[in-house]
Image (tube, rainbow, N blue to C red):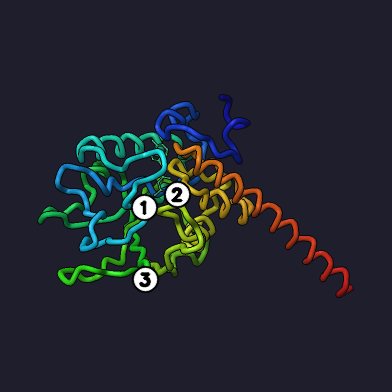
Amino acid sequence: MKFPDDFVNKIICGDSLSVMKSMPDCSVDLIVTSPPYNLKNSSGNGMSVNTKSGKWAGNSLQNGYSHYSDNIPADEYANWQYECLCEMYRLLKEDGAIFYNHKWRVQNGIIQDRKDIIRDMPVRQIIIWKRKGGINFNPGYYLPTYEVIYLIPKPNFKLVPRANSYGDVWEFTQELKNDHPAPFPVALIERIISSTYATTVLDPFSGSGTTAITAMALNRNYIGIELSPEYCQKSELRIERNKVQSEVLKSKTAKLFEMSL
Ligand SMILES: C[S@@+](CC[C@H](N)C(=O)[O-])C[C@H]1O[C@@H](n2cnc3c(N)ncnc32)[C@H](O)[C@@H]1O
């Protein structure tokens, strides 16, 4: 596969690490991603998602993803994710940044703050994403409602003017009209991409293609990498639908403009 022709504005169906390794250094401006969280790992530190009394009872992730179990030993998972972050960092231009979404949790008394993944990455800031909604079946816990987004920039990364006024706690409702088990809300990705000058945005765990369609809507290029052929196909359909919708919108706007002359 040749860069950029086989990558830019494409959803590539394959393993994230192998595909990233085939891309040249400094080839993207922005990386926005949410990896699998290893929610079902069997080390005893995994979150119980498959019982009615679990904190996330009823969570659609209880069956894992279509082509990935989300259930590997904790050490293996942390090494894999760290290696992915190193590849992402290599791919960034000198004014680029990674927005890496993850979840902190306490499991069997062990605080999992993801330091085992982040290690020596030059984190500049942690953004709290407050997800509204959810149902808690467990009387022993307050309803968990937040996730974190690590901002990991290259040295020359800057936000566009006024984006810093969003602060570092963002409230966005979970996406309900999407049958992927863990989709990003479009509004969250819109905020991230529109806060930057990025031309090309990569999501190496692209799922249902939310980063891709949002980049498109904001007139940026996208590169999506996703293991599941099923989710890749769904992303392509979503991209096509969004292309049609934006053409319809453009022609309606043009007609209104003509009428106003
Ligand atoms: C949290 S979901 C991402 C959802 C996405 N943000 C969205 O809005 O739809 C993580 C995705 O990573 C995919 N995945 C798991 N292992 C992968 C791998 N080795 N390479 C690429 N994608 C992988 C899963 O299939 C899943 O769709």
Which residue is farthest bottom?
260
Q: Quadrant of residue 222?
A: top right
Which residue is farthest front?
52
Answer with mark 3 or mark 1, whichever residue precedes in sequence.
1
On the picture, is 37 further left or further right than 99? left
Q: Mark on residue 133? A: 3
Kindly identify the amino acid type of the residue bearing the numbered disc 2: Val
Which residue is farthest top?
1
Say if disc 1 is inside 8 Å of ligand 1. yes
Q: Quadrant of residue 254?
A: bottom right
Q: Which residue is mark 1?
A: 101
On the picture, is 204 further left or further right than 200? left
Q: Secondary structure at mark 3?
A: loop
Determine crowd level at label 1: few under 14, some 14-19, many 20+ residues with C-alpha closer than 10 A: many
Q: CA distance from mark 3 to mark 1?
A: 18 Å
Q: Quadrant of ligand 1?
A: top left
Kindly identify the amino acid type of the residue bearing the numbered disc 3: Gly
Of badges 2 and 3, the one in the foreground is 3
Q: CA distance from mark 2 to mark 3?
A: 23 Å
Q: Position of residue 131 (x, y in %)?
A: 37, 66
Q: Secondary structure at mark 2?
A: strand
Task: Relative to 126, say whether 153 is above or below.
Answer: above
Answer with mark 2 or mark 3, whichever residue precedes in sequence.
2
Please name whichever residue, 92 or 104, is drawn nearer the observer in this view of the structure: 104
Q: Which residue is mark 2?
A: 32
